[in-house]
């Protein structure tokens, strides 16, 4: 019986290893593309939070234009996570997005916190980005190192 479980365990591990990176890419794509699309069509419940943050940080920018830009930006980030050769770019754009996505926790505490370490639903929505960050770090761990160019005496 032990050998049977060992074989099954090995088969499961091999399968999970084979599908884990594509699933991580797909998960990030779905979240970013879907949520971005909702912003573009003014259907996102996060739009009110984005508008409040924009008023607090960049009041001279039109919300209507910014939310469409943000939506397309998120959709683009999601799309490029599907392309393994663009992982570095995807992660760089993700970092920019995540930094700005965390700002409401600081600039809008009455909207994002009920109390110490007790986030509102909006705060939880923001904090879930830790899971996306972990997925991106897993993808980054498998990026091929950049090759050094050989000096050709130029």
Image (tube, rainbow, N blue to C red):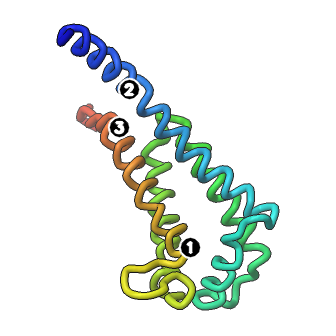
The tag earlier along the polypeptide, 1 or 2, is 2
Vertical arrangement, residue 144 with respect to residue 62, above or below: above
Relative depth, front residue between 72 and 147: 72
Q: Quadrant of the C terminus?
A: top left
| Residue 73 as seen in the image, left or right of residue 141 | right
Residue on which the image places disc 1: 121
At label 1, counting other C-alpha atoms closer than 10 Å, the crowd grade (few under 14, some 14-19, many 20 or more) is few
Residue on which the image places disc 3: 143
Give me the disc on residue 16. Answer: 2
The tag earlier along the polypeptide, 3 or 2, is 2
| Residue 7 as seen in the image, left or right of residue 108 | left
At label 2, counting other C-alpha atoms closer than 10 Å, the crowd grade (few under 14, some 14-19, many 20 or more) is few
Q: Is residue 146 visible?
A: no
Which quadrant holds residue 138?
Answer: top left
| Residue most extreme to the right | 41
Vertical arrangement, residue 113 with respect to residue 40, above or below: below
Q: Residue at horizontal 46%, vertical 67%?
A: 127
């Amino acid at each position: 019986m032990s050998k049977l479980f060992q074989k099954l365990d090995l088969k499961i591990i091999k399968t999970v290893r084979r599908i884990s990176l594509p699933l991580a890419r797909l998960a990030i794509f779905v979240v970013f593309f879907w949520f971005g699309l909702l912003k573009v069509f003014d259907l996102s419940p996060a739009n009110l939070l984005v508008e409040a943050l924009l008023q607090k940080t960049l009041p001279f920018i039109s919300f209507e234009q910014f939310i469409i830009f943000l939506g397309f930006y998120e959709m683009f980030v999601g799309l490029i996570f599907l392309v393994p050769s663009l992982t570095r770019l995807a992660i760089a754009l993700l970092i920019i997005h995540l930094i700005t996505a965390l700002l409401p926790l600081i600039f809008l505490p009455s909207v994002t916190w009920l109390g110490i370490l007790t986030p509102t639903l909006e705060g939880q929505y923001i904090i879930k980005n830790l899971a996306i960050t972990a997925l991106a770090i897993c993808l980054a761990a498998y990026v091929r190192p950049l090759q050094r160019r050989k000096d050709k005496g130029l």
